[in-house]
Amino acid sequence: MQINFIFYVVSTLFKPHEKANTFLKHLSEIRNMNRIILNCNQMMNLTQLNFGKKAIITKVNGQLLALKLFEMGILPGETVALSNVAPFGDPIAINLSESKVCLRMQDAKCIEIKLID
Amino acid sequence: MEQKEITVALVGNPNCGKTSLFNALTGLNHKVSNFPGTTVEKKTGSFKLSSSKTAHIIDLPGTYSLYPKSADELVTYDILRNKSENYYPDLVIFIADASNLKRNLLLFTQVADLEVPVILVLNMLDVAERRGIKYDIEKLKEKLKVPIICINARKKEGIEKIKAILLDEKARITAQFFSLQKVNPKLLDEIATINDKRNKYSALQYSINASNLLTEKAIKLNEIFNKYEFDCIGFQEDEVLTRYQIIDEAVKHARIKNITQLKASITAKVDKILTHRYYGISIFLVLLLMVFQAMFSWSEYPKEWIEYGLKVFTDYIQNTLPPGVLNDLIVHGILAGLTGVLIFLPQIILLFLFIAILEDVGYMARVGFIMDRIMRPFGMNGKSIVPLIGGMACAVPSIMASRSIENKKERLITILVTPLMSCSARLPVYTLLISMLLKDTAKWGPFNVHGLILMLMYLIGFFAAIMSAWMFKFFIKQKEKTFFILELPGYKIPLISNLLITIYEKGSAFVFGAGKIIIAVSVILWVLASTGPHSNIQNIETKYTAIINNDTTSAIAKKELSLQMNSQKLEASYAGEFGKLIEPIIRPLGFDWKIGIALLTSMAAREVFVGTMNTIYSVNDDGDNSFGHIKTKMMAEINPRTGKPSYNTATFLSLLIFYAFALQCMSTVAIVKKETDSIKWPIIQFIYLTTLAYGSSFLVYNLFS
């Protein structure tokens, strides 16, 4: 993890053509990530969520996919729980606060979560 | 001046009770068609508001957002955006599911920002209350600033309130939620010069969408976006999240109580079983078996009644109209075509009754869920399994049923391969051919070989469908990127009125949509089979009529002679000519011109093959025994060119394979044309399936002879 961050910072520093605000954005992102890492030691994605556990969505990756997920109510800050797994282990159904949505594993991978007790 | 008529658009998420509200408002007073140039279903209807005022209502497809990503969303967006659009509404009725208010309101704020007057209709408050969610409507009104009406669409409660507010012109209020503060105003101005729209939000939205196309305008738009370093998707993401913040605030403000810890709902309990690893698939297969059984055997009785009724009617017409060309045209052309159309109705009604129940209950989404992994490698969707299995009874209603597949590519693949499933019309053909292939008593261990071969034919059809789907996956390009993200709605008891309306819609869509084509083709086939290029037909008829009318001929001989006359007439007709014309083409498959005729007439329906063979071999079609007669006659046939029997094992096997693959069903072609709204796809399908049939038959014939 640490090495990744160093690489991230260094690579950003060595791109002088990039705008200063982009750099600041990256910095704030790194700060955010650090905060998450400090708060809980594991970064998980939705495919790693087990039955009976609850989690909060921290980030949704994948541009168009993220948009679609937001529209379906899967957005940062929402609480999720695993509801059902289809017969061959894929897709999965998740419970959101007000609805139940099913999605394929490949798309679930793009959803980062944080476990809550 | 007061308006006499107003146009209202009904907008909302899927599964929010939109159809129930539409049905409650219009009853049967509505029409179903497609939006021009699309396969998106358009429902329009009208209802009386007062003695002097009518409302025209258009049901827009259920979507989750207004970003035009799919055809459904594009239609909704185009209508609400463009004031010069034919269906541009005076007012939008936005129906929202109160048990899932946050997500429903996302689309609501997007619609409102297009500056069209909106009223918000809250449905399913009872479901919300059961989940411990309750709203203070006045407080919600404060935040959302539009009129709010609470209804129960299933119980038809609150419908009058909607009608009352539609009459009240003061209630036509527009609201605004999202502001374009963060966007560079210069960018907005420049976009406005290209897209002359009064609403800046809509202009930006439209431009983002248009910039994905490969037009000159798009290049220009992209230049502008690049100039201002505008990130389209980033902006959209940001917009959606901002809207959620606004909504969250409103919803929290209006929420009365919130019990987060609830007992497992009924839906969760039922889902544990219905989507279970083992039970889930077993239950689904049992349900499918029932649907299949119903389409296959229950539909036989109403089919017989329709056949009988039309036969009585046809006989009546035949006997009352003076004999001649007109009589023949009506009886053998138009009425035969009409029978061909109506005969499908029982199967369509039964399949759609089942599908509508499963859909309304909420089970169809689960079918997609549990079957997705199995169907995915073949370029299909979990929901494709229903049309595929339905295709074993009849491809026509099954292709209509593929509408429930949202993804365009997966839906198209399903439509293209469904006719490969062995349908019930192939059964008489298979039975006849297999009985010619083997003795009735042939056994293999404890099994009857006939049954085994029949099962093999069904399996061959299934595998051909799966493999073709896999192949099409690589050839069909997809314009829109779609994801398999499906809402699993709570289980509900289906409403009988909704079921009946769905069946009525599907039945009439088939009869008036595909029916026209079927009757037209039936008339053409009749003309081909009853007229010929030379005067031979007339000569044959006069020759035989003279003998038949001779009193000295015995009754049995008369019958035999009239059968012979029909056989010779068919040979002299255009159909006969056609058979002879294509003989060189089909000879490599082991077919002669007689089978060529049958291939042509089979286009009406595959089982016509048996009838045509009867006519060609002048066999009296007396039901059960005709198989035996025609078998004897066909086996005795000697090919004049080779001096050997015309038909052998290889011929029959080749014919079996040909019938398993070829698209010899004009009803299927007609329905594919209607469902894909193109001529291209039925043509591609026809060519593909004919090539597949020809190639496989050629292989089989040469392997076995």
Image (spheres, rainbow, N blue to C red):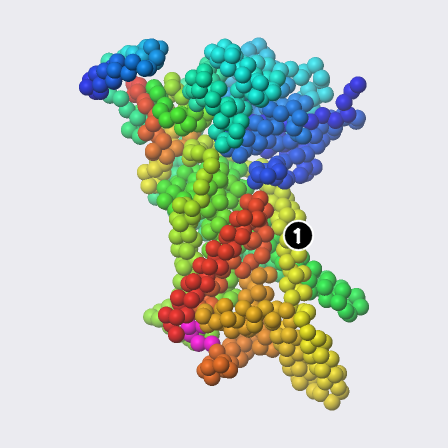
Q: Is residue B630 magenta?
A: no
According to the picture, the residue beneath numbered tag 1 turns out to be B516
Residue at 51%, 27% in the rendered image: B218
Q: Secondary structure at mark 1?
A: helix
The residue sitting at 64% across, 74% down in the picture is B572
Q: Seen in the image, is B665 located left or right of residue A8?
A: right
Residue B50 lies, in percent from the top left, at 76, 25
Q: Quadrant where the C terminus of chain B lies? A: bottom left
In this rendering, would B446 be left or right of B588? left
Indicate the position of residue B495 as horizontal and vertical percent values.
58, 37
Residue furthest to the left in view is: A3
Between B648 and B386, the residue placed more toward the observer is B648
Q: Nearer the viewer, residue B52 or B204?
A: B204
Between B609 and A113, the one lying in front of the other is B609
Please say if B463 is above or below B35.
Answer: below
The three-letter code of the residue at mark 1 reads Lys
Task: Name the quarter where the N terminus of chain B is drawn.
Answer: top right
Residue B154 in sight here: no
Residue B546 spot, x, y in % from top left: 74, 83
For the residue carrying disc 1, how many other residues have a C-alpha within 10 Å: few (<14), some (14-19), or many (20+)?
Answer: some
| Image: magenta residue range | B647-651
